[in-house]
Image (cartoon, coloured by chain):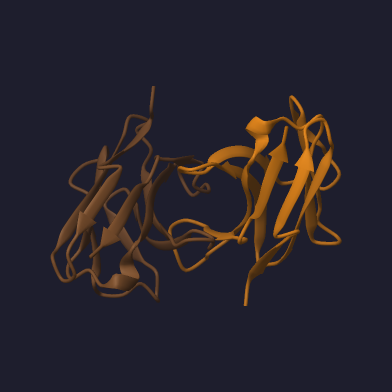
Amino acid sequence: EDKVVQSPLSLVVHEGDTVTLNCSYEVTNFRSLLWYKQEKKAPTFLFMLTSSGIEKKSGRLSSILDKKELFSILNITATQTGDSAIYLCAVEAADYGGATNKLIFGTGTLLAVQP
Amino acid sequence: DAMVIQNPRYQVTQFGKPVTLSCSQTLNHNVMYWYQQKSSQAPKLLFHYYDKDFNNEADTPDNFQSRRPNTSFCFLDIRSPGLGDAAMYLCATSTGGGPAKYFGAGTRLSVL
């Protein structure tokens, strides 16, 4: 059965800290891995990773994928209170029986950044 | 400007009373998804439309139906809501066979 596991489940840090969120997966027919940020509403797309070893960066956030070890990390440097959210990892898997690929979500990491 | 719009943001219904949630998009994407997300859980795919083709997930209860009258709009109908259907319902879109990247703000459904 396909699964996506995120760790830690929750994390409390202080402003200015650097955090690393982990996502490991066991998915048949892997196509890509996506990171989303979810505050009190819908998920907001952050990154889509398809190739190993190539870092994607957006401001203080960065992410990298290791397709050999089947995991990804999301780094946030110089955290701010506005970074407080649930961070969701999802893996896109080819679904040859369907018209579109499947998206399998992890249960998320709840990040709380204290002033 | 919001690209995937869900209405209403909050919906309260009674046990067993049919309810319809709506989603519209200005992206002209051909794929629209409906996800159910319960508290502290990951979003769970209910079904999706690829153009006019409806694709139901195997474990989606028959109580959940969907309609897509045109490219821009998609509806989620819950025929007889139970207490266990209280959740956030998320609509998302994508192009071609790509993953859902653009989500609406969600509709939080409460069942009394």
Residue at 47% across / 68% down in the picture? A97
Is residue B75 in sight in this rendering? no
- Which residue is outermost to the left? B17
Q: Is residue A54 left or right of residue B48?
A: right
Residue at 65% across / 64% down in the picture? A29
- Quadrant position of the C terminus of chain A in the picture: top right
- Quadrant position of the N terminus of chain A in the picture: bottom right
- The residue lying toward the viewer, choosing from B56 and B81, is B81
Q: Is residue A77 left or right of residue A89?
A: right
Residue A66: % across, % down = 83, 53
Q: Which chain corresponds to the colour orange?
A: A
Residue A5: % across, % down = 70, 65
Position of residue A72 relative to residue A94, above or below, is above
Residue at 62% across / 61% down in the picture? A106
Q: Is residue A26 left or right of residue B87?
A: right
Residue at 15% across / 71% down in the picture? B16
- The residue lying toward the viewer, choosing from A71 and A20, is A20
Q: Is residue B25 left or right of residue A36?
A: left
Q: Colour of chain B?
A: brown
Residue B91: % across, % down = 37, 47
When asked about the image quadrant of residue A77, the answer is top right
When asked about the image quadrant of residue A27, the answer is bottom right
- Which residue is outermost to the top? B1
Is residue A97 in sight in this rendering? yes
Position of residue A59 relative to residue A98, above or below, is above
Residue B93: % across, % down = 41, 43
